[in-house]
Amino acid sequence: MADKVAVVTGASRGVGKGIALELGAAGATVYLTGRTTEPGPLPGTIGETAREIGELGGTGIAVACDHHEDEQVAAVFDRVRAEQGGLDILVNNVFSAPDLAPWLHKPFWELPLGAWDQVLDIGLRSHYAATLYAAPLLFANDRPGKLIVNISSSGAVSYGHNVVYGVGKAGLDKMTADMAVELRPKGIAIVSLWPGLVFTELVATGATTTDDGRRVVEIPGAGTFDISHAESPRFVGRAVAALAADPETLEISGERRTTAELAARYGFTDVDGSGAGARLR
């Protein structure tokens, strides 16, 4: 992917960071966005992610961006246009996971009305906005294999976390399907990707070790989950890199795929050599 240019939103840590690292390791020039420019309660900054991409042999360019602010999002793509002239890969990943944490598995009548705006703004509207601004750059690029990946989850079709989370993911998958219709004549593939349970920095903060040595995380209202077989963020990144390298990705444009399905299709493993995780996020 030495000639590829990618934008990954929300790449300070977690899934976004894993995706940015794998695209960079494959040779892409990766613009990565996020709000975290200084160390905070959770590990990870956009600058640290960019440096790690460099250590893997790629090129990482950190761009501070609050995806609540449309002007900042537009500025990201203006910069890509000025510096690269076009775009090959967009990964819409930014999500307000820390904000969602206090609302996990609470019925909708116990949630503040602002929960709707927070979850659907950063995670649905933000993905729409980034794709809107990215489209002209994708059109300007005449290289084959142009790709948009929306990070979604099984919450699109089954109950997960709370009502607003599920509505946001369902809306994202529908957006993927409808955009595929309009993007297909342009030769641009768009896919919803469902990771499994991912061992992110946020999950790590709540992880404990049982008496029998298992690593688990307890989600209020949902129970205790064994995370010993959770996917790493880079496993999700390898799924995106595999999609980006597949010349036939347009055949599944508009569809949703799990990381486990893609691992079976393309033959990649996690960083520890293991196969796909067993549970969906």
Image (cartoon, rainbow, N blue to C red):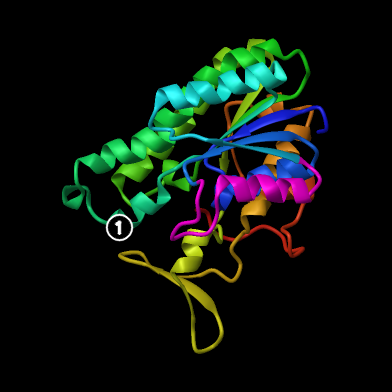
Q: Which residue is mark 1?
A: 102
Is 165 left or right of 176, judged from the image as shown? left
Which of the two residues, 47 or 145, is positioned nearer the viewer here? 47
In the image as oriented, which residue stretches furthest toward the front? 38
Is 279 left or right of 29, judged from the image as shown? left
Residue at the spot x=42%, y=39% of the render?
169
Residue at the spot x=67%, y=52% of the render?
234
Residue at the spot x=77%, y=63% of the render?
273
Q: Residue 78's spot in the image, x, y percent?
A: 57, 18
- Quarter of the picture holding the N terminus: top right
Q: Is residue 259 above or below residue 272?
A: above
Q: Residue 14's spot in the image, x, y percent?
A: 55, 52
The residue type indicated by label 1 comes to Pro
Helix, strand, or loop for circle 1? Answer: helix
Residue at the spot x=52%, y=60% of the render?
201
- Residue 38 belongs to the span the image colors magenta: yes
Q: Quadrant of residue 214?
A: bottom right
Is 58 left or right of 222, judged from the image as shown? right
Q: Is residue 120 above or below residue 253?
A: below
Res. 7 in view? yes
Please state the extent of the stretch shown in magenta in the rendering.
Answer: 37-58
Which of the two residues, 213 or 54, is positioned nearer the viewer here? 54
